[in-house]
Image (cartoon, rainbow, N blue to C red):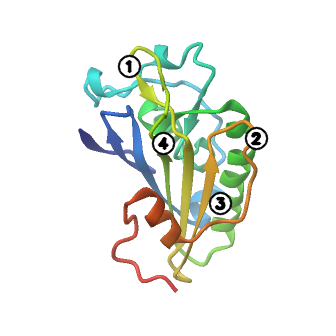
Amino acid sequence: MQRELCYDAFAILHSGTTKTPVFVAERLTRASIEVANEKRTNKFFADARLPRGERAELSDYKGSGYARGHMAPAGDMPNATAMAQSFSLANMVPQNPSQNSGAWSKIEQDTRRYALRARGNVFVITGPVFGPKSLTVGASRVRVPTHLFKLVYDESTGKAWVHWQPNSEDARVSRPISYADLTQRIGMELLPRVELR
């Protein structure tokens, strides 16, 4: 079961099977990043818009050894409401804590820096990838991704690139892969009506 959830600054396609996003979409601009200096609320919550059997609960992450990893980052949020909404567990995946605070955090910061320099809209689509042997955490059986991706598309230049990372302690920021590579790896067209240059 998949459900669409809209928030002030991002939208989620959520899976009731994995209890995580399928992907999360954001539109970043120079203006939105310039005002994104809200204090982190760190008030995680189970999203009441999702039926109990389709969502992650706070207890699922407790003692799991995994961080509650934002797909739409708190650092992207342009106002207090959006910041609070970004802590919905519908926007989270079980993420290796070292990756979350290390390589993944650098990718998020680099994406914001890029949006500050871009001439217009930068669309960012972030999501988890589950291997055949992916683990689960908690009573709700929240699936743990084997990889994460962050697709960045600059509307003004028509260029797109993808950060692809293993969800592991030793993950490093490496060269981005192409949009075509991502499509092949995840079996999904995330920019179906866009002509890339």
Between circles 2 and 1, the one closer to the viewer is 2
The answer to whether residue 114 is above or below residue 158 is above
Question: Label 3, on which residue?
Answer: 111
Percent across and percent down for residue 147 are 56, 46
The answer to whether residue 56 is above or below residue 16 is above
- Mark 1 / mark 3, whichever is N-terminal: 3
Crowd class of label 2 (few under 14; some 14 to 19; many from 20; radius 10 Å)? few
Using the numbered discs, state the Cα–Cα distance from disc 4 to disc 1 in whole angstroms: 19 Å
Residue at (70, 39) in percent of width and height: 99
The answer to whether residue 139 is above or below residue 47 is above
Comparing 91 with 78, the one in front is: 91
Question: Label 1, on which residue?
Answer: 140
Q: Is residue 34 left or right of residue 129?
A: right
**Which mark, residue 170?**
2
**Which mark, residue 193?**
none
Using the numbered discs, state the Cα–Cα distance from disc 2 to disc 1 in whole angstroms: 27 Å
Q: Amino acid at mark 3?
A: Thr
- Mark 2 / mark 1, whichever is N-terminal: 1
